[in-house]
Image (spheres, rainbow, N blue to C red):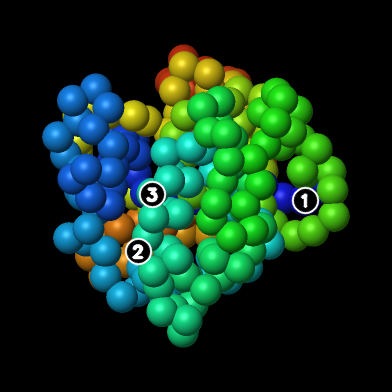
Amino acid sequence: MRKLMVTTFLSLDGVMQAPGGGDEDRDGGFEHGGWSAPLFRMDLLDRMTEVVGRADALLLGRRTYEIFAAAWPLAADDDPIGSKLNSMPKYVASRTLDSVLWQNSTLLTGDVADAVAALKEGDGGEIQVHGSCELLQTLIEHDLVDEYHLLVFPVLIGSGKRLFGKGTVPTGLKLIDTTRSESGVVVSTYARGGEIEYGAMGPETDNWRTTR
């Protein structure tokens, strides 16, 4: 089974909309586009270069695909992220696109959840999802995400599209790595952790001293 890994930039209050530029995504009258750029330094670029470098395929929603397809083909040949994104297989989930012209791109057909499940069962290495907020809601709802690589920026947005929306299914996660960037961005990786465990704590419980 291929691993499906989600990587995304988040504000501290969970917003993932338009981190890279003012006109990236103005849905809902969003006016805070580009909120991650002032805090994106060389160490984060190195981190993302390493992450993209291990990908074997890219899975994108329509909006992120169009943003990437307009920008990354312009990258220099020696750009490690651009060369990797341009050359690897790309799968696009869209109800409105009729074709995808970025090299090595394939438009998924039929039910998105079924198509992604089939991709995971095929041959190959890690499948990565970048951005693609609406697609992520479907993947999360159908329990198709194996790992989250989250870059949490020390800003509060207040409104906008969030990674974990109404379709989020209760599940446990396991923290497998966390670091702090020079600009205060917390980069954490979470893997599947099984079902949520429930309990109680407080001085009225028998295990109060063992849970503190």
Asked if the residue under mark 3 is in contact with the one under mark 1, i.e. CB atoms within 8 Å, the reply is no
Residue designated by label 2: 180
**In percent of the image, x 47 and y 29: which residue is there?**
134
The residue most toward the left is: 31
Q: Amino acid at mark 1?
A: Arg
- Residue 172 in the image: x percent, y percent? 61, 33
Name above or below for residue 198 compared with residue 69.
Answer: above
Residue designated by label 1: 2
Q: Residues within 10 Å of mark 2 (few under 14, many from 20)?
A: some
Task: Give the CA distance from mark 1 to mark 2.
Answer: 28 Å
The residue most toward the bottom is: 78
Residue 26 in view in this figure? yes
Choose between 144 and 155: the one closer to the eye: 144
Choose between 111 and 140: the one closer to the eye: 111
Q: Earlier in the sequence, mark 3 or mark 2?
A: 3
Element marked by disc 3: helix
- Residue 92 in the image: x percent, y percent? 59, 42
